[in-house]
Amino acid sequence: MEKTNHVVHDHYDAEGSKIGMWFFIFTELLLFGVLFVIYSVYRYMNSDAFHLAALELDTFIGAVNTIILLVSSMTIAMSTTALQKGNKPFTLLLSGITLLLGIVFLVNKYFEWGAKFDHGIYPGSAHLTETFSQGEILFFGLYFIMTGLHALHIIIGLVLISVTMWKINSGKVHAERAALLENSGLYWHLVDIIWIFLFPLFYLIT
Amino acid sequence: MSNEKHHIVPYRVYVFVLLGLIALTLLSIEITHIDLGSLTVAGAMVFAAVKSYLVLTWFMHLKYDKPYIVTMVIFVFAVFAVTIVVTFLDYLYR
């Protein structure tokens, strides 16, 4: 049964990798899904407080970050096309733009959270517990947990894309072995989809 | 059927999808500025669902993937939808 005639032991399986990535994405959907269930129940029970608290968030920054993520999703999707066409510099440029946009997203998030902290709004702060109602405290708790977990996913995505770019540059990922780039792209799109729901739930529905 | 291993999606397709996504984002911001009462939440969620559909279909290549992957994705989203419905049935009728 030994395949001695196989000189190169190539364990590359694009379809297997893709299924694995999708399974992982399903677990991520369940992770965020539970938080969305918690959000919708608390929103149902405290709709007035959620309405009030959401007014504290800046729709403009939220919208800018949404568009940044959407564009970054497009560039990472395009980079797969570029890789399949064998255009390495363009692949690196497009995934580099994705990387940069992800960092810009985080910088915006930093200033947004920073402004909230300056106003005394952070989990467990005296200002929050003394002047806000129970429902508003719940809103901000969910806001920090859900956008924080999302930001953590952005950071993981950035690391993943950096590793992929490194391997594209060294030639380990190319047109015939594009799975790593495709799967990094899938992960990045997942992060995008989660934000697509976070944005209206926290910034828009006021 | 485009089930070949290397289906290369043209760049312009992604540009069109992005333009659609940005248009939907701006539209959802406009819509939620109008006071529709409880319909506002539903409206915003419909926009988010359409946007996710676009991302899943085009950016995540489900359009070109084998049917079993699409089936799994639909199944997982259906499980999530059922979870939401059951949770609310519990809260509404307890």
Image (cartoon, rainbow, N blue to C red):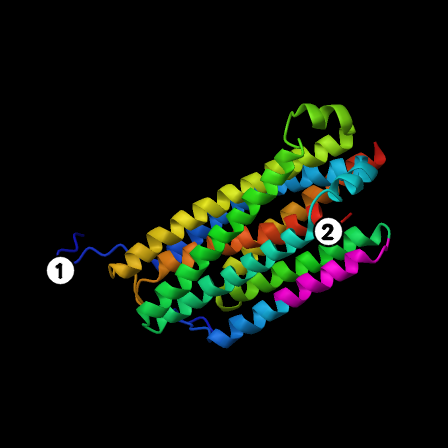
**Which residue lies under the disc numbered 2?**
A204
User: Which is more toward the observer, A57 or A137?
Assistant: A57
Q: Examine the rendering and report whether any part of residue B75 can be seen.
A: no
Answer with left or right where residue A201 lies relative to residue B34: left
At x 48%, y 56%, the residue is A101
- Residue A153 is situated, as x and y percent measured from the top left of the image, at 49, 44
- Residue B30 is situated, as x and y percent measured from the top left of the image, at 76, 61
Q: Identify the mark nearer the N-term, 2 or 1.
A: 1
Answer with left or right where residue A80 lies relative to residue B36: left
2 or 1: mark nearer the eye: 2
Q: Examine the rendering and report whether any part of residue A162 can be seen.
A: yes
At x 67%, y 61%, the residue is B25
Q: Secondary structure at mark 2?
A: helix
Determine the chain carrying the residue at label 1: A
**Which residue lies under the disc numbered 1?**
A5
Q: Which residues are magenta?
A: B21-36
Q: Secondary structure at mark 1?
A: loop
